Image (tube, rainbow, N blue to C red):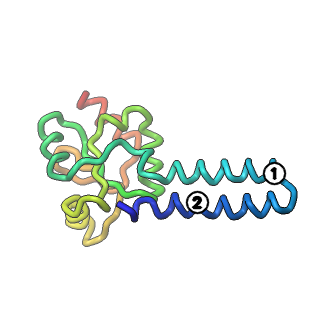
Amino acid sequence: MMRAWILPMLFVLCGSVVASALVLKGSPGAAVVLLLVFVSLAGLNSPLVFPRSIAAVEAQRRSAADGRPVVFWRPGCTYCLRLRIRLGRRARQAHWVDIWRDPAGAAAVRAVNEGNETVPTVFMAGRPHVNPDPEWVREQLSRSA
């Protein structure tokens, strides 16, 4: 769990250090703006941006029942963030599995990516799609709704 928060914590820490230096130099306005930028970057790279993750076994069971895709992701992945943002509100319709929190999810991703943990990997109807186009995922979500 802690590994997922390393990048966001680094953003906040670096932003705090730089903002403190700007305050000491007499630029409190610039310090506030810069700190807000760093906090925003931390928020975008945190697990909070993504829908709640579930276990891979549970996600596959739910997907078999409702036909929705299973998205395997990890915090800090820019491609995962791009997919999440481009899906908008529809992202909550998919079943999300954080491979850093679920060893079975990481194993499922490695099994279809030649041993690599390449994410996002989306399973639709049992077929893997590595780093798919967000528009395609949105179409799959529309079909399953």
Compared across the picture, whether 45 is left or right of 54 comes to right
Residue at the spot 18% in from the left edge and 36% down from the top edge: 67
Quadrant occupied by the N terminus: bottom left
Q: Nearer the viewer, mark 1 or mark 2?
A: 1
* Precedes in sequence: disc 1 or disc 2: 2
Say which residue label 1 marks.
28
Which residue reaches farthest bottom? Answer: 115
Q: How many marks?
A: 2
Compared across the picture, whether 95 is left or right of 13 comes to left
* Residue 85 position in % (x across, y down): 47, 42
**Tag 2: amino acid:** Phe
* Other residues around mark 2 within 10 Å, as few (<14) / some (14–19) / many (≥20): some
Residue at the spot 48% in from the left edge and 56% down from the top edge: 78
Residue at the spot 16% in from the left edge and 40% down from the top edge: 62
Measured along the vertical axis of the image, is residue 6 above or below residue 70?
below
* Residue 20 position in % (x across, y down): 74, 61
**Tag 1: amino acid:** Pro
Compared across the picture, whether 29 is left or right of 73 comes to right
Q: Secondary structure at mark 2?
A: helix
Residue at the spot 29% in from the left edge and 47% down from the top edge: 53
* Residue 81 position in % (x across, y down): 46, 50
Numbered label attached to residue 11: 2
Please identify the quarter of the rendering in which residue 74 is found: bottom left
